[in-house]
Image: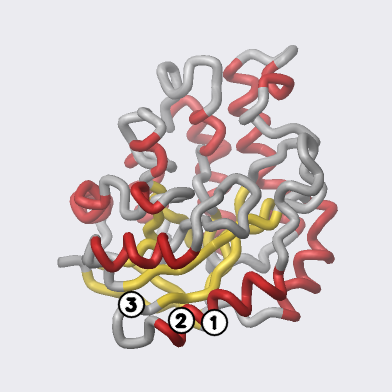
Amino acid sequence: MLWDTHMHSQFSGDSQSPQEDMISAAIQKNLDGICFTDHLDIDYPEEPEAFLLDLPNYTASVHALSEKYDGSLPVRLGIELGLQPHLAAVHDDILKQYPFDFVIGSSHVVHGLDPYYSPYWEGRTEEEGFLEYFESILENIRAFDGFDVYGHIDYVVRYGPNQNAYYTYEKYAEVIDEILKLLIAKGKGIEINTGGFKYGLGHPNPTEEVIARYRVLGGEIITIGADAHKPEHIAYDFEKVPPILKAAGFSYYTVFRNRKPEFIRLE
């Protein structure tokens, strides 16, 4: 089976799921391992306190559960940082203080607004909103590269007025290629996030074309995550993952331990 290395628990502001419930679901689904990646979104516009992760208790909880389930399921400690350029120094300080196995850098807030909420789309066409989102990713990577993998690169299409009805990689190829090239140059990976299937997009985040393009450009690091916030969404549609990765030219996927990539061959 596979590892699910993008999931959230009661420590994230948008989840109420106990970590042990997530672990039990992962064991039931015969996963080879998991990594918790609860949200830390500092300076979040809508609810400033919602995503301020309780880091001491979070890390202690994951370490305790890792010991408890040793021999049954590897449980690793990760984090999903909500990147904004002005937070680079703060994020650097945090990562020096805690022994994370894995760090996802993600774009949730674009110039003070989250595309999840309607104000982001006011005064913007869908195309303008998508483009600004992708351009903000470049700003984040240039300001901070302390992450291992960039999360759900086309997150914005989940919440666009028409979702992905008119979205294609080709339409935004210039800026997406710039993102991928910069990630590769910095030795960073991307993820295949099956949350896109859960949201009814019919594709992962990012789409199959972006995953294939990352590989063509020389990208080697790709992790797998369902972005689950509830136990029932762990490993969501994971049966679709190996064919997508193989079609993109991957014979393996990646997990992280102590911030070091480990490459696991696809069956």
**Residue indicated by mark 1:** 63
Residue type, mark 3 in image: Leu
Q: In this view, does 203 lie above or below 159?
A: below
Do the residues bearing badges 2 and 1 touch, measured as CB atoms within 8 Å?
yes
Taking the image as shown, residue 114 lies to the left or right of residue 10, namely: right
What residue is rendered at 36% in x and 45% in y? 194
What residue is rendered at 61% in x and 51% in y? 106
Taking the image as shown, residue 62 lies to the left or right of residue 44, namely: left
Residue type, mark 1 in image: His
Of marks 2 and 3, which one's residue comes earlier in the chain?
2
Q: Is mark 3 on a helix, strand or loop?
A: loop
Q: What element carries label 2?
A: helix
Place residue 164 in its image quadrant. Answer: top left
Residue 181 image point, x, y percent: 53, 53
Taking the image as shown, residue 266 lies to the left or right of residue 34, namely: left
Residue type, mark 2 in image: Ser
Residue 102 image point, x, y percent: 54, 71
Colouring method of the image:
secondary structure
Q: Nearer the viewer, residue 24 or 215?
A: 24
**Residue indicated by mark 2:** 66
**Residue indicated by mark 3:** 73
Separation of residues labelled 1 and 3 (CA atoms): 13 Å
- Asked whether residue 258 is in view, the answer is yes
Q: Is residue 101 above or below residue 182?
A: below
What residue is rendered at 59% in x and 55% in y? 182
Separation of residues labelled 2 and 3 (CA atoms): 8 Å
What residue is rendered at 32% in x and 60% in y? 25
Do the residues bearing badges 2 and 3 touch, measured as CB atoms within 8 Å?
no
